[in-house]
Amino acid sequence: MKKEPPIRLTTFSHGGGCGCKIAPGVLQGLLAQMPAGICPPQLLVGNDKSDDAAVWQLNEHQAIVATTDFFTPIVDDPHDFGRIAAANAISDLYAMGATPLFALALVGMPLDRLPKQAIGRILSGGAEVCAQAGIPVAGGHSIDIPEPVYGLVAIGVVDPARLKSNAGARDDDLIVLGKPLGIGIYSAALRKGLLSTDEYAEMVRWTTTLNRAGTALAKLPDVHALTDVTGFGLAGHLLEICRASGCAAQLDFAALPLLRRAAVLAREGVRTGASARNFAAYSDAIHWPQMQEWQKTLLTDPQTSGGLLVTCAPDALPQVQAAFASYRCEGVCIGRMWRGGTVAIHVR
């Protein structure tokens, strides 16, 4: 009997992971067309703030944090895809300093082309990561569509006094990144057959690592701003912090943590289409003199389940790095914030 070839999930979709996000400029135009909605005082964070999740205050010490995230496959293995998508969705809760409570699954699958066993493995991968986060998958919704899509609605809780947003950065804050960059580059290399077994394992290791340090970071009063780096790349998400906080940023390119072969692949021209869209959307807000194309690729590379991006007082850096280390993340200082300036981000 002829053996069936293994399922390659990435062949079912036009893109993968957070690289499928609508480009920042296009998204901004779409949101501008939305009519003004109600904004009750209990809504501490809504869609007007470009933050990671919505926050609704229940009482003096409790607020509900709600988010959703889903995408098409970034890897071929169904179980790995489910794990990565779940970790990515839950990350938005950690990026607000919240403790996760439960999740709802969002499932869209081409039932006529994708074996039910593979779909089951996607769901089991997502449930596995939710269990690691200490939460149940309490329900969800599924539809039959042409491309496979999976993700979560994630619900958490936070003390409003410990809520962290992207709007709190202060003059002289240090900028700290929790995971290495290069996930989008690795995903593009995977599609082209350029990723080794060890490099694939490296990619899965980081994309399935939960950003649990966010809950610990929320307890530190000298942590002023917090977000996670996903589809808009490091430069795009740092730009959101700059705009929300009224600050500028100085990035030290040499300090950026990278996946082992990310720089080599970037020099060889490996990148996602989303990287180019990101650059087109916000390059005018960034000063990067004499930077080569591969360096710009790394700054704009879309990260799926990327690291937390933190700004903190200089004296708090040891505590911030200790929080990251306790959850198997890196906590690398990559720059500094300051007030003023006409260009949001300066790269040296």
Image (cartoon, grey):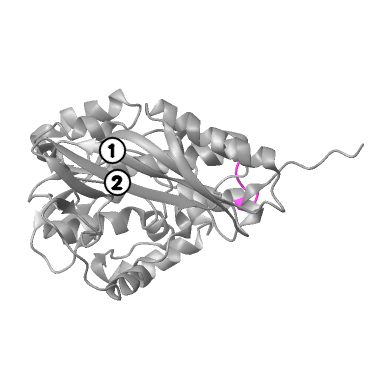
Residue 270 lies, in percent from the top left, at 53, 56
Give the CA distance from mark 1 to mark 2. Answer: 6 Å
Q: Secondary structure at mark 2?
A: strand
Q: Secondary structure at mark 1?
A: strand
| Vertical relation: 311 (above or below) 294 | above
- Left or right relative to 301: residue 315: left
**What is the magenta segment's predominant secondary structure?**
loop
The residue beneath circle 2 is: 66
Within 10 angstroms of label 2, few (less than 14), some, or many (20 or more) residues?
Answer: many
Residue 164 lies, in percent from the top left, at 17, 43
Residue 90 lies, in percent from the top left, at 36, 40
Q: Is there CB contact under 8 Å for labels 1 and 2?
A: yes
- For the question of whether residue 106 can be seen, the reply is no
Q: Residue at x 55, y 41 (%)?
A: 81
- Point out the stretch of residues depicted in magenta: 191-196
Q: Amino acid at mark 1?
A: Gly
Residue 49 lies, in percent from the top left, at 21, 59
Circle number at residue 156: 1
Asked if the magenta segment contains residue 120, the reply would be no
Within 10 angstroms of label 1, few (less than 14), some, or many (20 or more) residues?
Answer: many
